[in-house]
Image: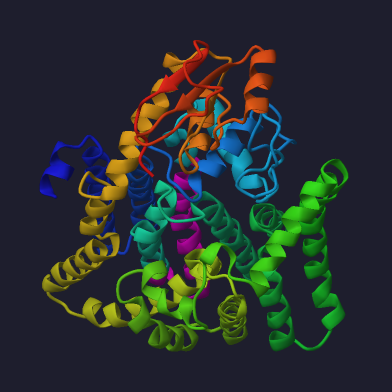
Amino acid sequence: MFDFYINNSKSILLLAFLFFVALSILFHLKQKNRTAVLLLFCGAIFFYLFAVFLDPFLNVWDECFHALVSKNFINHPLKPTLFDNPVVNTSYNDWDRYHIWLHKQPLFMWQIALSLKMFGINEYALRIPSALMASLMVLIGYRSAKLMINSNTGYYTAFLFATSFYLLQLVSGRQMLEHDDLAFMFYVSASIWAWLEYVYSEKKCWIYLIGIFSGFAILCKWLPGLLVYLAWFTFIILHDRKKLLKKYKPLALSFIIAVVIALPWQIFTFIRYPAEAKAAYGFNFLHFSEAIDGHTGTFFYHFLNINLLYGFLSAILIIPSFFIFYKKTKNKPLVISLFVIIAFVYLFFSIVKTKMPSFTIIVILPVFISIASLIDYLFHFLFKIKYQVKYILITLLLLLWGYYRIDLKEIYQEHSLADDYYKKLLKNSVILKSLKTKLPPNTVVFNVRGVMYLDIMFYSGLTSYWLIPSEEQYNDMIKKKRKVAIFKYKGTVLPEYIKNKSDVIILNDELVW
């Protein structure tokens, strides 16, 4: 494991992260928290760039899908396609084999498309927007916690975001629903931050920003993006029951802005792609009643994943954290409103039949503020120590806690040749990336294992399929003057109408699935 970090060029990014974190802690001990957080933000950029370069391939489920649709968005931003140039007469009736792909809302893929346009068609450019958003959560976390409690709590909230193993896994594409869930978390968190700014300042500009961020959240992953309005509605009831109508006017204005941002895409897709839109929305609603694609679990599934989402010791700390958070803040109705959305999210997704780890990550901001308030409460006693030993103790505790949170051992086990999945996809990627130079540009590739037909289309632009073409499909390719390439694995028996054809390119590379 040691050699992995010493001999790997990614170690420079990791060392830069550690340097900025250590420097940040020193400024925090001097109570210069603004400088400390800026250094922490710099460290987070290096940490999440480290995540960007962890896997030199597209991850299966679901990064390869998002990568391909994003790439296709470059040429036609209003036409979401998985198969950009379908040349075989076949049925595109499954979400993983659609031509027009409305399985996800478009904003996070538009962001990726912009990055691919700027930095090239590769898996690293794909992850840059997620790395940026994960890093910005450091600043959002600091400011939100500072508003509610104090700058020390803000610093510890920022520290939690800068050392999140789960966010690293989302940025790297390894955790399912990766860039979609991270963008969704970011915009929901940004809407909550903007709302907190409005509560404390009552400046009208924040009303607009709440609506903008909520609208963006909807355009990442639909209606849970409106979560901030549940907190806002609860706060109005708890905080001031007088002049309720006057209090609801800013909420209504912000809500209208969110709708104006998100609704046009929904209307456009139903007008332009009615059958596909109806199928996509129908499939999404099935998540409530069915465990889609085997993603099942008990009612307590999300509670059992608290450590996974929020990091080391979170499951133990969470209840006392809520208590201290409530105790430390002067604005009790505001804290209760945040507790309401946490409870709502966990109850709602515990009832929903389909279970995925990231469903509840949209409440990461209030959860991290809660945990940070407990840390601040405990460290308060250490700051009272007059001797220099307090600096040593706090530094060691933060570094130790950060070490366990980022989990270097787990990073090594999952993102190196020590991992079978990593070895398999690395081997496949070498083969798939080489097709761009090995095959003519008018080639159609067949018999691709698993969903690696997506990787081929992403890296090379060659239309690819999972099937062996029928005789009719093969003849159609010849009429269209398309070259036919087909993977022939050990044990693969090619049909007579393909065998020994001089115009068929046989690929003997063994893709592993």
Q: Where does residue 279 sit, x and y in percent of width and height?
A: 76, 54
Left or right: where does residue 47 sit relative to residue 292?
left
Q: Is residue 296 above or below residue 425?
A: below
Q: Where does residue 410 sit, x and y in percent of width and height?
A: 25, 58
Q: Is residue 335 above or below residue 356?
A: below
Q: Is residue 10 above or below residue 368?
A: above
Q: Nearer the viewer, residue 193 or 457?
A: 457
Q: On the rendered image, what quadrant is the C terminus found in? A: top left
Which quarter of the figure has residue 343? Answer: bottom right
Residue at (40% x, 51% y) in the render: 174
Q: Where does residue 74 sit, x and y in percent of width and height?
A: 64, 29
Q: Is residue 31 above or below residue 38?
A: below
- The answer to whether one can see residue 203 in this image is no
Residue at (48% x, 21% y) in the render: 499
Q: Is residue 491 magenta?
A: no
Question: Which segment did they paint magenta?
Answer: 128-153
- The answer to whether one can see residue 367 in this image is yes
Residue at (48% x, 51% y) in the render: 61
In the rendered view, how is the structure colored? Answer: rainbow
Q: Nearer the viewer, residue 260 or 332?
A: 260
Which quarter of the figure has residue 497? Answer: top right
Q: Nearer the viewer, residue 133 or 287?
A: 287
Q: Is residue 141 magenta?
A: yes
Left or right: where does residue 413 sit relative to residue 87?
left
Q: Nearer the viewer, residue 361 or 440?
A: 440
Prevailing secondary structure class for the magenta stretch in the rendered image: helix
Q: How many marks?
A: 0
Q: Where does residue 220 sit, x and y in percent of width and height?
A: 64, 53
Which quarter of the figure has residue 57? Answer: top left
